Amino acid sequence: GKHLNGSFPVKASMSAGSAVIGGVLIGTAAQGMEEGEERPLMTELLKQMRKLCVPVDSSPSIWKMMFDIQNVLIYEVEAFESRLVEMGFMDEKNSSDNGFGDDPRDDIPPKQLSSPMGLNVLVDENVLSPIHTNATASFAATPTPPTFNAENKTNSIRSPLSELAHSLLQSYMEKQRSSILNNGRSILLSTDYHNSVQVGTPVPDPAELGSLESIDEDPLLAFDLHQCSVSTTAQQILQLCRSTLDKATDNEAAEMLDDLRPMLYRASRELLDLFRAIIPTMYASEVASIPRMAAILHNDCVYLAHEVSLLGVEYKEKFRSLVPSSARELVPGKESGNELNKIQLLSDICTFVDMVPAFRDLATKTMGYMIELQKSQLYELVKPRLENFVPALSSNESVTEWDDAETALRAALYHLKHLSQSWSQVLSREVYHLSMGNLVDTVFTMFLGPVLKASEITDPASRFVHSLYLDAGRGAANLFFLGPMSTDSTSVLPMPEEKSSTVSKYAVMFNKMQAVGRFMVMRLDDIQRALGEGVFQSVTARELAHLISACFDESEKRSSLLNALASK
């Protein structure tokens, strides 16, 4: 009837009621509550057939069974549809023209038209049932099903059921792909993204180019992943991607299911696309506001970019090893080598390197945005407190503006120290140093600006600036020392040479800050001598001349020094 092949009026179904048989709800629930819903029983049959007849597992033992399962299913569906034809519920026509025959109830009086699957079917013999009186009889023992091929496939398809039976292999492979992507989606949505694990290898800072130490460096260190922390989510996604590719390179896969390998390769790539689509969106607010979360996403992208750059090479060779050496020269398209050529082509196109720029771009944008956010926060902490610092440098005694400058430095170093605690155990050593150097330069620039602009700097102000810059240098050096940090960022202990060299390598303004700080306690003779020693290499001649004019009164020595600087 129409429950199988067409729509059924809602009013008739409502009057018929519904029943539960074997745990399956039939009647109004089976056909739906909307007017004109098409083929509710056929839809349910297809749904259950996909659920129960298409295997979920993926293993060589299942792959071996798939052709047998398909042949049995085709045979059983053929028998079922032949029975429906005998009962008058289905035509012999192909399903492409929707030939489901005429409704045998068209000649029945309206009074007897009730929901064929309603409760009345079970209790009233006068109600027309779509099931033949002999339908409950057991079918004869099913003989060994014949093998169906492409030649008789078209003639065998009568309904969506037989269409699904004939395309069981394709349905199985698509179900495998959906299962893999669902597993990946579950990992991305349910795994706590805050959990992290260390990956990579400890890589020392590279030696200076041209030095003796650089000769002994291993050139392959450039290809190592620097030790950092990544989320367990990224690690699990990569493991799922690898396990999918391992199945694709299984020796038995192509022998049984020819199209399984390309589908698995496709699914492995889509897992990585899922990561880029879900994680930045799902944790957008946290990544944009929490430094550690931004660092984790940055590391995940760097980690995945590093792994996928090698993944294609690794599995390309595995795919290639499955092709017999005698068949590797076959030309694609020849019938004699079609199956082998599919593997050959897959080995040729197997690559993930096209995903590397996307991951690197996401890593750069994530960390770049966070660094800009930290710069703006440092600007809010420091800049308002230095608004009146320039005129305060002409004072001969301590003023409020000097205290504000010290407060601003302490606030900036405190902010950077807490940022260092979030990043030092997460980011790789190189990225951590580059990030902190960028932020330290921001702070140094804000403190250097007023001093280099001042038209008059008194001796007390010079000593104050010297002390202030010295504290800034020590505090910055502590940020670059990845070990037990000093509890006092403005400690009076001398700065170790290794710290100073590390800071100057990553913070461009550090040497300039140190040079200007030393200048503040020098006499003109000391400045003349320091010029010859290269102490002021990071300070321009114009800036040094302006400092001399601001700090020293007019004299013959000052004029001589200014003339010497003007000639450079």
Image (cartoon, rainbow, N blue to C red):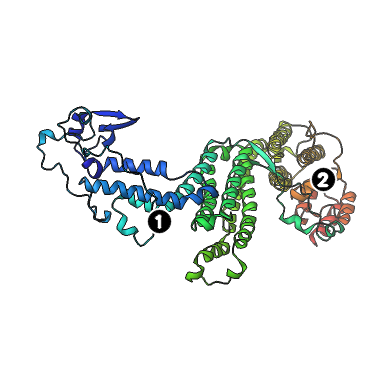
| Front residue of 231 and 382 | 231
Position of 186 compared to 29: left or right? right
User: Which callout, 2 or 1, points to the residue nearer the camera?
Assistant: 1
Where disc 1 sits, the SS reads loop
Label 2–label 1 contact, CB within 8 A: no
- Residue positioned 74% across, 47% down in the render: 201
Residue pointed to by mark 2: 500
Amino acid beneath label 1: Thr
Position of 567 compared to 229: left or right? right
423 up-or-down from 562: above or below: above
Amino acid beneath label 2: Ser
Instruction: Decide: few, some or many residues near mark 1? Use Cα within 10 Å; few <14, some 14-19, many ≥20.
Output: few
Q: Position of residue 78 (x, y in %)?
A: 32, 50
| Front residue of 79 and 276 | 79
Quadrant (top left, top right, bottom left, bottom right) of the N terminus? top left
Which is more N-terminal, label 1 or label 2? 1
225 up-or-down from 112: above or below: below
Where disc 2 sits, the SS reads helix
Quadrant (top left, top right, bottom left, bottom right) of the C terminus? bottom right
- Residue positioned 58% across, 52% down in the render: 245
Q: Residue furthest top?
A: 123
Q: How many marks?
A: 2
Residue pointed to by mark 1: 147
Q: Position of residue 508 (x, y in %)?
A: 74, 50
343 up-or-down from 7: above or below: below
